[in-house]
Structure formats: structure tokens, C-alpha cells
Image (cartoon, coloured by chain):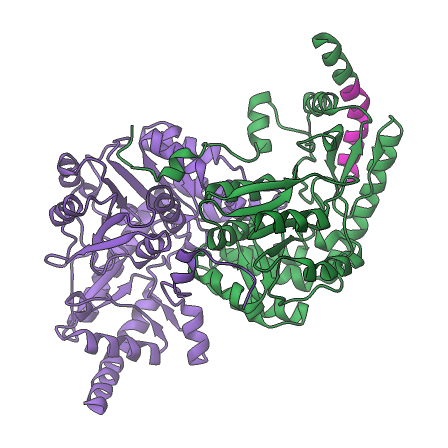
Chain colours: A purple, B green
Amino acid sequence: MSNARLTPLAASLPSTVPFTGPEELERRRGAPFTARLGANENGFGPSPLALAAMQDANGGIWQYGDPTSHDLRRALAAHWGCEAGHIVVGGGIDGLLCDLVRLTVTAGDNIVTSLGAYPTFNYHVAGFGGQIHTVPYRNDGEDLPALIAKAAETDAKLIYFANPDNPMGSYVPGTEIAAALDALPQGTLLVLDEAYGELAPEDALTGLPMDDPRLIRMRTFSKGYGMAGARIGYAMGHPDLITAFDKVRNHFGLNRAAQAGALAALADTDWLCHIRAEVATSRAALARIGAAHGLTALPSATNFVALDTHRDGTFARALVAGFAAEGIFIRMPFVAPQDRCIRVSCGPARDMALFEEALPRALAHAEASLTATA
Amino acid sequence: MSNARLTPLAASLPSTVPFTGPEELERRRGAPFTARLGANENGFGPSPLALAAMQDANGGIWQYGDPTSHDLRRALAAHWGCEAGHIVVGGGIDGLLCDLVRLTVTAGDNIVTSLGAYPTFNYHVAGFGGQIHTVPYRNDGEDLPALIAKAAETDAKLIYFANPDNPMGSYVPGTEIAAALDALPQGTLLVLDEAYGELAPEDALTGLPMDDPRLIRMRTFSKGYGMAGARIGYAMGHPDLITAFDKVRNHFGLNRAAQAGALAALADTDWLCHIRAEVATSRAALARIGAAHGLTALPSATNFVALDTHRDGTFARALVAGFAAEGIFIRMPFVAPQDRCIRVSCGPARDMALFEEALPRALAHAEASLTATA
């Protein structure tokens, strides 16, 4: 036993990881994956200008990054037509969610999320002693009115709502969310995770205010901008709330090259257009490949596609294992009935071809493993 | 006002930054610094092999980093002759301190540190509601027996002890620290911040156990390895405590290129030897330059030198401002009597020449500003 006396809360927490990373899965199987389509990474990669900016910034990597992310926040403010004071930059949405939960949630406080939504948010809430209340998906989408009703019922401090949604890929028009703000209980903050925002149809994000006191919006350079490994994202909201992040955030925690890369990525709108086109092509490919084998693609506003197996979670899990056996990393929703689907990230044509080649074998693997255990 | 209901603790915290970064100081003065010698960054830069590894890793920056830092932890274990289970990798010592404080400190818990020691540790403790108890420096060094006595008096959960020390540059032999472990109160963890360890005399670090339940040691790639902007460091200790980090850490929070860079930096022992030699040369230069103008260099086990002005904090502050007016960024200790010194980072010959050129003018500036306000 260590001499460290953990807090009662820390002592009660499991030493678990919300997700097992693909590298760990590769080590377990003793071989690398041939296609990495499980973490909704963007295999089309970052803008060449962003890459060049990161390479260039590495020449000054002996220096700490600017703790205020001054230049990036100003560029983001110009991009969004708001003030820099409406924006805080952090280590991806995961890091920003941690800071937000720390600011608002203490033992016994309630939050509301969808059953089967982003586990890392729940990890942070549990990590600060919060109580998680869930609402089921409705028609494979997050159910905002039900989330709001549950928040009223539980006096929730936060509602987590991903738009577009992960893992199902669905979305709600921004105007619908904006209209719902008036229905929010007093003292409930709507946390809008827009990780996939850059890949969504335009109406998913229009009509949303930048500094409404009832809303905080989170964005990342991990998905549309293809910089997941750089770990940089931002939150936009009311200046009072944004300023509060300075109470707890790790001010010097941001990688210097990531800041430079984000700045360049934001400016390269041509590349983002290119990515959107590539992702649309890949979504169509996944739908076509799935359909040829009886799997139905759900509509996706993201860089991944939920493919409905028309079976159950047991089958989908066996199918994910079948893909792993074929060297292809994918994931799937956690809870029923969404766990009847597998979730496959978009990727370059090479990855789509590997997926197509593996699908019939993975299906056979799944059928065989179920027969064996029946 | 935002709809967010902050926790009582969060509401009580100031939105302050432990340090103002040099970029912000540059914006305020309207011009960049010509020499950046205030943050103990390593201007000699990282190993070319580490730089190449980061550039190479950027090609895969669209992928999240390995959340277990498997390869780096194994390389560190081999380097230290311990098990990977004794090591956790994090976003620099700042990030690791935050996680450690979160694991151990809750409202009303006590910690002990030296008066004038690292403010970011205090920031984290305050951020989790802890009570900070301080012990003054003795002979410009941290006073381990007094820290231990204060811990016994206050039933402290943590003692923060930097070895070598920042901001004074002094150090205590590792064997002395190891011998002091038996004097630690039951339930007090000694947090050894060895940020400058790679630059210290060998006896600063010898004789220290890797997995003693009473000790956690923290290291970084920011200083000796010249990768401050990459944000990567690690902690070593008893496996029970190391595993506990998995309860709260941001598992996918590490930059992928930083992990690759750290792995390469660790292997390039020649470069670290080169850095140690360059730093020794620079320390001697700072001592010589200071002496020529009546400032006395304190012995330094780090990549910075505390130069004693033989005056008081008011004069030293004016001198820091004088250097800023000359375009040179330095810092100084926070509290008396250590604040009679200025703290200057080591750097390449060009930076030393700029410092030498600026010193007489900065001194004149300081004298003039004090006369003006007298």
C-alpha cells in the first residue's frame, strides 16, 4: 500500500480506462491493424498547411506554448464572429469536459445524458462525484426534450448533448436546439458536444448563439481537421463561464505545435471542403458495402457510419471481433437497441477496400462464433 | 451571468494564472523579447533525433496517441531499472501534480511546501480545497526536516519538495532524502519534483527508491530534454499509487508526437551529455557576467542561475523590469529574502551575450526607477 491517502471519492473510483485504445488491441492480438476505423479518426489527415505549421513550430518546441492561446483564440473569434473572451482553448473536448465538470459538479450533483452516449463525459462526472441520469435514445437519436425533462426532474446542473451524435451519427437542426434553450430549467447548462460539427450538414449548427448563458459549445481539431493526436479543441460560451475555466485549467498544458497547427488548419478552408467531400464519398462507400451484405447504413452527419446488422448486440459484438480477427479496428454502440449496429469510421479508399474485403469473412466469423457458443 | 452553477469551491477560486507567459508580456510591451531566459526553458533545444521523431510522428497525427504510453513507459522502465507499472506518463509535471492533488486532496486537507516554491503546485492544491502550510527556505534551500516537522504538525497528506530546487537552484543529495523517508509521518506522501534532475549533479538523485510507498518522483522532458512545448513528463512510484492515476487522468490527453519525441529523447544519451555541458558553460557565463556587475551567482544544480543582487525585492523587481525594457525576459523568486535575487535561465552564447550587454543598462534602469519613486 502506498502512503498516499486517497480522498474518499478517489478511493471509490475504479482504475478503469473509458476506452481501450487500438494500440492495446494490437498488442493483444500480436499484430497491427491494417485499417484503423474504430475511433472516428480522420484518415484523410490534416491540412498540409497545418502539418507544415506543426513541423515549423517544432523548431521552437523547447519553448512552452502560449498559456492564453492568444492568436488561436483571436482567429477563432474572427472565424465565429464573436469575441476572444467567448472562447477557451483546451486539450481536446475530453480535457474541456473535465474542466467543465470540475467547475460545476461535486458530490451528489446531478447531470443528464443519453444512455449510451459519450462514456468519457460520464467518466469525468463520476470522477467528481456526480450522479448520472440517463434518457434512452429515440429513433436512434438523442432525445433533447426528454433530456430537458429529466434535467427538470433531477435539478441537473448539466445536460450533455452531442450534435451530431456519437455513436449513431444522427443530428438535430441547430434552430431546434436554440428553440429548446427556453425550456431549460433555471440553472441547467446545456453542454453541446459538436466534435463532428465540421462534418455535419450546415443546418446542424446554424441558429445557435455564441454567448448564451444557458449553453456551452465544444469543438475539436480532432475530427474534421484531422489532428486527433495533437490534442486541441475549444469551448465557446458566455464570457463568465469561459473565464471560469481559468480557475482550474492547466494553463501551460497545451502543446505548442498543436496550437500552431490548429491556427493553420482553421485558415485552410479549402482543405476542410476537401475533407467534407472525401468523407461524403466514404460514407456512401460504407453504405454501399454494408448493403451488399445485408447491413443498413443509418444516415450520418459525421465521419463515421452506424451500420445496422438487423440482429442484436451479441451478434454485433461478434462482428466487431470478426473484423479484429481480419485486422480491422472498428467499434460499436454500448447499449441496446443501438448495439445492434457496428460503427465504422470513414477513411481513404484503401481502407474502404480492406473493409469491403473483410466484411463477408467477419460476418462468417461472427456466425461461426455464435454457433459455437449456442 | 451564466446558467452554470459553479461548485462552492469553484465559485471561491480566483480566475488567475499562476504565471504570466512571455507571449503576454511581449504583447504588453509591443515587441518580442530578444532573449527568453525567464521560464527555464532549454534554448539548446531537443535532441535532433527527438525532433526527427516528432516530425515523423506528425505524419500520423490524425491518430490519437496511445492512451497507455506503452512504449514510452517500457523504455522508461528499462532506463530506470524498474517495472512499467511504476511509471505513469502525463502532460508534464504540472498535469501530473494536478492529478495527484485531485487523488489525495479534498476540502480541508493539508499539504506542506516551502514558502516561495512552485506556485503551480499551490494552484492545484487550492483548486481542490486544500490548505497550504509553508516552511521558509533555509540558506536559500528547501528545508526538508522542517517540511517533515510541519507535515507531522498538520497531518499533511503531501509534502512538495523540488530537488533541485526552483527558484534557487540548490539541491540536496538523494541519499539525504532517502534517509529522511523514515522520518515522514504515517500517511504523508513526499512529492519529489525532479524537473531539473537531468541537469543536476549525480548525487542529487542517487540512492532514491523507485517504488517506495512514501515517495513519488516526477520528471519531465521540458528541461534537460528541451521539449517544454511538447508537454510530456512522468511520475515514478509505488504501483498502487501509480495505478490510481488511471482513476482520474485524461487517458487520451497526450500528444502523439510528444510521446514519440520523448521516446527518442530518452535514447539519445549523447545529446543529454551535450546539453549538460552547454548548461554548465552557460551557468559559468552567467556567474561571470553577474560578478562583473556586483551580482553573485548562487550555486546551481539546474539550467538557471539565481543571481544575488545584494539588495532587496524592490530592487530585484525593478531589475527584472529593466531587463524587460531591454528586451530580455527573466523572472525572480516571489518571497523575501530570496526575492533579493533574479533568476536567469541558461541559454546559448548569443543569449548570454545579449544578457551581458543588457545587464548594465538594466541595472541603471532599476536604479533610476527606484530614485524616481523614492
Q: Position of residue A36 (x, y in %)?
A: 37, 67
Residue furthest to the bottom: A372
Q: Nearer the viewer, residue A41 or B326?
A: B326
Q: Residue at x 21, y 54 (%)?
A: A133
Residue B157 visible, this orientation: yes
Considering every residue shown, the one lying at the far front of the view is B153
Asked if residue A357 is positioned above or below residue B132 in the image, the reply reads: below
Q: Residue at x 36, y 53 (%)?
A: A124
Quarter of the image where one finds residue B30: top right
Q: Is residue A59 visible?
A: no
User: In this orientation, which residue lies closer to the viewer: A337 or A98?
Assistant: A98
Report the front residue among A278 and A207: A207
- The residue that appears at 51% across and 58% down in the rendered structure is A5
Q: Quadrant of the C terminus of chain B?
A: top right
Q: Residue B193 appears at what percent x and percent y?
A: 64, 52
Residue A122 quadrant: bottom left
Q: Which residues are magenta?
A: B346-363
Q: Is residue B99 magenta?
A: no
How many badges with numbers are in the image? 0
Examine the residues drawn in magenta and state their main secondary structure: helix
Residue B246, horizontal then vertical, whole percent: 45, 62
Q: Quadrant of the N terminus of chain B?
A: top left
Left or right of residue B354, residue B292 in this image: right
Residue B348 highlighted magenta (yes or no): yes
The answer to whether A96 is drawn above or below residue B267 in the figure is above
Image-quadrant location for residue A214: top left
User: Residue A306: where, in percent of width, then height?
Assistant: 21, 63
Q: Is residue B178 above or below residue A186?
A: below
The reply, left or right, for residue A129 in relation to residue B64 is left
